[in-house]
Image (cartoon, rainbow, N blue to C red):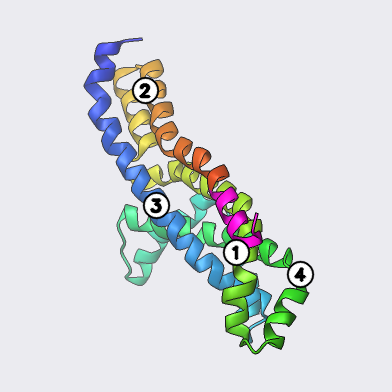
């Protein structure tokens, strides 16, 4: 292991880790928001939106992220829409992630007894209030494991965005290996970069699940 080389290229990895973190934060946050909206449309069978959302889920989950990114980066300019590699990466991660998040939320809602919703309506809550104050908090507790797994999946999928010339961790590693042939050093820093992003999520997940479950069920 060439430690002098590690010190030399470390700033590039720090910048790439920050780029990867930004992609991850935007992708995960937007996936959660749009995933919840898609889930609501499907679960409550909203006219027009429900079949469109079901078709979107199937399309998103059954096409590779790489194909989606190529369409955004190389296909949209044919229609006069030009986006940066970073923007295409965020949109692609959101398009893919929202479908998985929607299914995670849907599984959580299915785990809540129908009696809960019926009781909320019986005491005078509107359907929206019943969902917001009764069903959703309980479903969130059941959804946390799947949501965390999807979050980790999306963070790792940022490695694909490098094909759009976005300087993320894998892109930097490939460039340095091609230039300097320092494979061990490059892969070592690559692992450290991803670990610095993934490990906090892995450590925080059990704590978050315990907190949400106690709030939802009083334990």
Closest to the camera, between mark 1 and mark 2, is 1
Q: Residues within 10 Å of mark 3 (few under 14, many from 20)?
A: some
Query: Alpha-carbon distance for marks 3 and 4?
Result: 33 Å
Left-right relation of 103 to 180: right
Q: Which residue is mark 1?
A: 102
* Residue 185: image location, x then y, percent: 36, 18
* Dot placed on the residue nearer the N-terminal end, 2 or 4: 4
- Do the residues bearing badges 3 and 2 touch, measured as CB atoms within 8 Å? no
Question: What is the spatial separation of the Cα atoms under label 1 and label 3, in whole angstroms?
Answer: 18 Å
Q: How far apart are labels 2 and 4 at the CA level? A: 51 Å
Q: Alpha-carbon distance for marks 1 and 4?
A: 19 Å
Question: Is residue 79 placed above or below 91 in the rendered structure?
Answer: below
Residue carrying label 2: 186
- Mark 4, residues whose alpha carbon is within 10 Å: few (<14), some, or many (≥20)? few
Between disc 3 and disc 4, whose residue precedes? 3
The residue under the point 50% across, 43% down is 204
Residue 189 vs residue 147, the one in the foreground: 147
Which residue is painted at 37% across and 22% down in the image? 186
200 displayed left or right of 96: left
Q: Per the image, is 78 magenta? A: no
Q: Which of the two discs, 2 and 4, sits closer to the camera?
A: 4
- In which quadrant of the rendered image does the C terminus lie? bottom right
Q: In the rendered image, which residue does mark 4 sit on?
A: 113
Q: Secondary structure at mark 3?
A: helix
Q: Secondary structure at mark 4?
A: loop
Asked if disc 1 and disc 4 are in contact, CB closer than 8 Å, the reply is no
Is residue 97 shown above or below 134? above
Extent of the magenta region: 208-219
């Amino acid at each position: 292991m060439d430690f002098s080389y590690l010190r030399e290229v470390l700033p590039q990895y720090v910048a790439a880790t920050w780029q990867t973190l930004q992609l991850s934060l935007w992708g995960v946050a937007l996936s959660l928001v749009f995933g919840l909206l898609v889930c609501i449309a499907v679960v409550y069978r909203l006219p027009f939106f429900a079949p469109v959302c079901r078709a979107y889920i199937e399309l998103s989950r059954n096409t590779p992220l790489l194909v989606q990114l190529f369409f955004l980066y190389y296909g949209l300019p044919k229609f006069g829409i030009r986006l940066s590699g970073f923007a295409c990466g965020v949109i692609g991660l959101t398009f893919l992630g929202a479908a998985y998040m929607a299914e995670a939320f849907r599984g959580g809602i299915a785990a809540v007894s129908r009696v809960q919703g019926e009781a909320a309506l019986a005491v005078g809550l509107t359907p929206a209030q019943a969902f917001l104050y009764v069903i959703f908090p309980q479903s969130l507790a059941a959804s946390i494991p799947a949501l965390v797994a999807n979050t980790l999946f999306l963070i790792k999928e940022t490695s694909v965005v490098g094909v759009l010339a976005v300087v993320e961790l894998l892109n930097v590693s490939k460039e340095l290996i091609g230039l300097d042939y320092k494979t061990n050093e490059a892969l070592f820093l690559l692992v450290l970069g991803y670990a610095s992003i993934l490990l906090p999520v892995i450590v925080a997940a059990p704590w978050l699940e315990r907190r949400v479950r106690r709030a939802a069920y009083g334990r």
